Amino acid sequence: MKVYHKTITVTADDLDDLNHVNNVRYLQWVQDISKEHWQASASKEVQENHMWVVSTHFLEYKAAAILDDIIKVKTYIKKSEGAISVRIVEMRNSLTNKIILKAKTEWCLLNSKSFRPIRVSEEIKNIFID
Protein backbone atom coordinates (compact mmCIF):
# COMPACT_ATOMS: atom_id res chain seq x y z
CA MET A 1 0.00 0.00 0.00
CA LYS A 2 1.10 3.54 -0.66
CA VAL A 3 1.69 5.33 2.62
CA TYR A 4 1.06 9.05 3.04
CA HIS A 5 2.95 10.97 5.75
CA LYS A 6 2.75 14.33 7.44
CA THR A 7 4.03 15.97 10.59
CA ILE A 8 1.99 17.95 13.11
CA THR A 9 3.34 20.19 15.87
CA VAL A 10 1.00 20.43 18.86
CA THR A 11 -0.13 23.98 19.64
CA ALA A 12 -2.01 25.45 22.60
CA ASP A 13 -5.24 25.36 20.55
CA ASP A 14 -4.95 21.55 20.37
CA LEU A 15 -5.03 21.04 24.14
CA ASP A 16 -7.82 20.11 26.54
CA ASP A 17 -8.23 20.94 30.23
CA LEU A 18 -5.55 18.36 31.14
CA ASN A 19 -3.05 20.00 28.77
CA HIS A 20 -3.14 16.95 26.50
CA VAL A 21 -4.25 16.95 22.89
CA ASN A 22 -8.05 16.95 22.85
CA ASN A 23 -9.72 13.77 21.55
CA VAL A 24 -11.72 15.80 19.04
CA ARG A 25 -8.48 17.22 17.62
CA TYR A 26 -7.12 13.71 17.01
CA LEU A 27 -10.27 12.87 15.07
CA GLN A 28 -9.90 16.06 13.04
CA TRP A 29 -6.33 15.10 12.21
CA VAL A 30 -7.49 11.63 11.12
CA GLN A 31 -9.99 13.21 8.75
CA ASP A 32 -7.51 15.85 7.55
CA ILE A 33 -4.77 13.39 6.58
CA SER A 34 -7.33 11.14 4.90
CA LYS A 35 -8.56 14.01 2.75
CA GLU A 36 -5.00 15.18 2.00
CA HIS A 37 -4.00 11.67 0.90
CA TRP A 38 -6.98 11.49 -1.47
CA GLN A 39 -6.34 14.95 -2.90
CA ALA A 40 -2.60 14.32 -3.35
CA SER A 41 -3.10 10.93 -5.00
CA ALA A 42 -6.28 11.00 -7.12
CA SER A 43 -6.55 12.88 -10.39
CA LYS A 44 -8.75 15.96 -10.58
CA GLU A 45 -11.23 14.04 -12.76
CA VAL A 46 -11.48 11.18 -10.27
CA GLN A 47 -11.97 13.64 -7.41
CA GLU A 48 -14.69 15.50 -9.31
CA ASN A 49 -16.68 12.30 -9.87
CA HIS A 50 -16.22 10.65 -6.47
CA MET A 51 -16.41 11.58 -2.82
CA TRP A 52 -15.91 9.78 0.47
CA VAL A 53 -18.05 9.74 3.61
CA VAL A 54 -17.29 8.08 6.93
CA SER A 55 -19.19 4.95 7.92
CA THR A 56 -17.30 4.26 11.15
CA HIS A 57 -14.32 5.55 13.15
CA PHE A 58 -12.45 3.46 15.69
CA LEU A 59 -9.76 5.33 17.61
CA GLU A 60 -7.41 3.69 20.07
CA TYR A 61 -5.52 6.11 22.30
CA LYS A 62 -2.14 4.77 23.43
CA ALA A 63 -0.38 7.83 24.89
CA ALA A 64 -0.94 11.54 25.38
CA ALA A 65 0.59 14.27 23.26
CA ILE A 66 1.35 17.63 24.85
CA LEU A 67 2.29 21.16 23.82
CA ASP A 68 5.13 21.38 21.27
CA ASP A 69 5.23 17.62 20.67
CA ILE A 70 5.93 16.80 17.05
CA ILE A 71 3.69 14.02 15.81
CA LYS A 72 4.49 11.84 12.82
CA VAL A 73 1.26 10.81 11.12
CA LYS A 74 0.93 8.12 8.48
CA THR A 75 -2.05 6.71 6.65
CA TYR A 76 -2.77 4.01 4.12
CA ILE A 77 -5.67 1.99 2.76
CA LYS A 78 -5.70 -1.46 4.33
CA LYS A 79 -8.39 -2.90 2.05
CA SER A 80 -11.26 -2.01 -0.23
CA GLU A 81 -14.35 -4.11 -0.73
CA GLY A 82 -17.57 -3.07 -2.42
CA ALA A 83 -18.11 0.62 -1.70
CA ILE A 84 -15.99 0.57 1.50
CA SER A 85 -12.30 1.29 2.00
CA VAL A 86 -10.66 0.71 5.35
CA ARG A 87 -8.11 3.42 6.12
CA ILE A 88 -5.51 3.15 8.89
CA VAL A 89 -4.00 6.22 10.53
CA GLU A 90 -1.15 6.01 13.03
CA MET A 91 0.32 8.85 15.06
CA ARG A 92 3.70 8.62 16.78
CA ASN A 93 5.77 10.94 18.92
CA SER A 94 8.64 11.92 16.61
CA LEU A 95 11.16 12.07 19.46
CA THR A 96 10.42 8.71 21.12
CA ASN A 97 8.65 6.96 18.21
CA LYS A 98 6.05 5.90 20.80
CA ILE A 99 2.60 5.25 19.35
CA ILE A 100 0.07 7.88 20.39
CA LEU A 101 -2.99 6.82 18.43
CA LYS A 102 -4.19 4.15 16.03
CA ALA A 103 -7.32 4.77 13.99
CA LYS A 104 -9.32 2.57 11.66
CA THR A 105 -11.95 4.31 9.58
CA GLU A 106 -14.37 2.81 7.08
CA TRP A 107 -14.99 5.25 4.24
CA CYS A 108 -17.85 4.77 1.78
CA LEU A 109 -17.29 5.88 -1.81
CA LEU A 110 -20.09 7.94 -3.34
CA ASN A 111 -20.87 9.18 -6.82
CA SER A 112 -20.43 12.94 -6.42
CA LYS A 113 -23.50 13.71 -8.56
CA SER A 114 -26.08 11.25 -7.16
CA PHE A 115 -24.53 10.85 -3.67
CA ARG A 116 -25.16 7.12 -3.97
CA PRO A 117 -22.62 4.51 -2.86
CA ILE A 118 -20.57 2.99 -5.68
CA ARG A 119 -18.10 0.15 -5.84
CA VAL A 120 -14.45 1.10 -5.41
CA SER A 121 -13.12 0.55 -8.92
CA GLU A 122 -9.76 -0.97 -9.80
CA GLU A 123 -8.71 2.50 -10.99
CA ILE A 124 -9.32 3.93 -7.52
CA LYS A 125 -7.80 0.92 -5.75
CA ASN A 126 -4.66 1.36 -7.86
CA ILE A 127 -4.27 4.94 -6.64
CA PHE A 128 -3.43 3.55 -3.21
CA ILE A 129 -1.56 0.34 -4.09
CA ASP A 130 2.15 0.18 -4.92
Image (cartoon, helix red, strand yellow):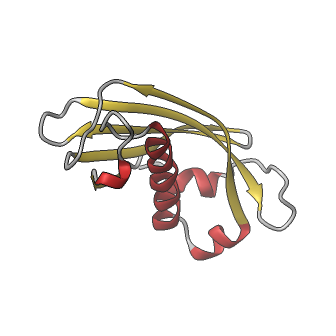
Q: Dividing the picture into quarters, in which one does residue 57 lie?
A: top right
Q: Residue furthest bottom?
A: 44
Where is the N terminus found, in terms of image quarters? top left
In screen coordinates, is 96 left or right of 67? left
Question: Which residue is rendered at x = 83% and y = 58% of the image?
Answer: 115
Question: Which residue is rendered at x = 68% and y = 72% of the image?
Answer: 48
In screen coordinates, is 9 left or right of 130? left
Q: Dividing the picture into quarters, in which one does residue 8 lie?
A: bottom left
Question: Which residue is rendered at x = 29% and y = 31% of the image?
Answer: 64
In screen coordinates, is 79 left or right of 64? right
Counting from the top left corner in percent of width and height, residue 119 is at 75, 47
Counting from the top left corner in percent of width and height, residue 17 is at 37, 37
Measured along the vertical axis of the image, is residue 115 above or below residue 47? Answer: above
Measured along the vertical axis of the image, is residue 45 above or below residue 12? Answer: below
Most foreground residue, 14 or 111: 14
Count of labels in the image: 0
